[in-house]
Amino acid sequence: MAKAIADTDVVISCIGPTSNFSPGTVMSEGIPNILAASQRAGVKRLVMQSGIGLSNGKELSAVNRWAIRIHRRIFSKTIKDKANAGRKMQRSDLDWVIVRPDFVTWLSL
């Protein structure tokens, strides 16, 4: 992976499970691998796409906040894996950003 990202300014990760009902640990294991490869390649910035389920939703309407609460219960394993990945990224030495798409976008996919 370090070879693939050599000579870049930033890595953008959109990794995620193929099923939110059985997510495994693709993000919590994948992000540390991306972090290590970025450090070996000298890349200093990482953007990770995460999920709205990790937001408190205060910027959303009451209906969307309600939907997020339901979403958290249904996809709790995925949310835990994403949260774990996010914590690992936050502890890294890289400049990082976690991007969470809004709920409307999630619904339109």
Image (cartoon, rainbow, N blue to C red):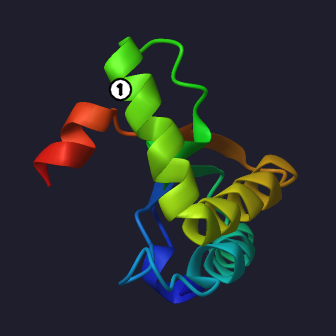
Quadrant location, the C terminus: bottom left
What's the amino acid at mark 1?
Asn
Between residues 63 and 11, which one lies in front from this camera angle?
63
Relative to 11, residue 37 above or below: below
Question: Which residue does the numbered mark 1 point to in the structure image?
Answer: 64
* Dot 1 crowding, Cα within 10 Å, few <14, some 14–19, many 20+: some
Indicate the quadrant where residue 66 lies: top left
Relative to 34, residue 54 above or below: above
Q: Residue at x 40, y 64 (%)?
A: 14
Q: Is 98 situated left or right of 12 in this image? A: right
Locate residue 101, reporting x and y percent. Answer: 35, 39
Relative to 84, residue 102 above or below: above
Between residues 43 and 12, which one lies in front from this camera angle?
12
Looking at the rendered structure, the secondary structure element under dot 1 is helix
Indicate the quadrant where residue 33 lies: bottom right
Q: Residue at x 70, y 69 (%)?
A: 35
Relative to 83, residue 35 above or below: below
Locate residue 43, reporting x and y percent. Answer: 61, 60
Q: Is 70 situated left or right of 92 in this image? A: left
Q: Residue at x 61, y 63 (%)?
A: 76
Q: Residue at x 39, y 36 (%)?
A: 67
Locate residue 31, reporting x and y percent. Answer: 65, 71
Q: Is 33 situated left or right of 62 in this image? A: right
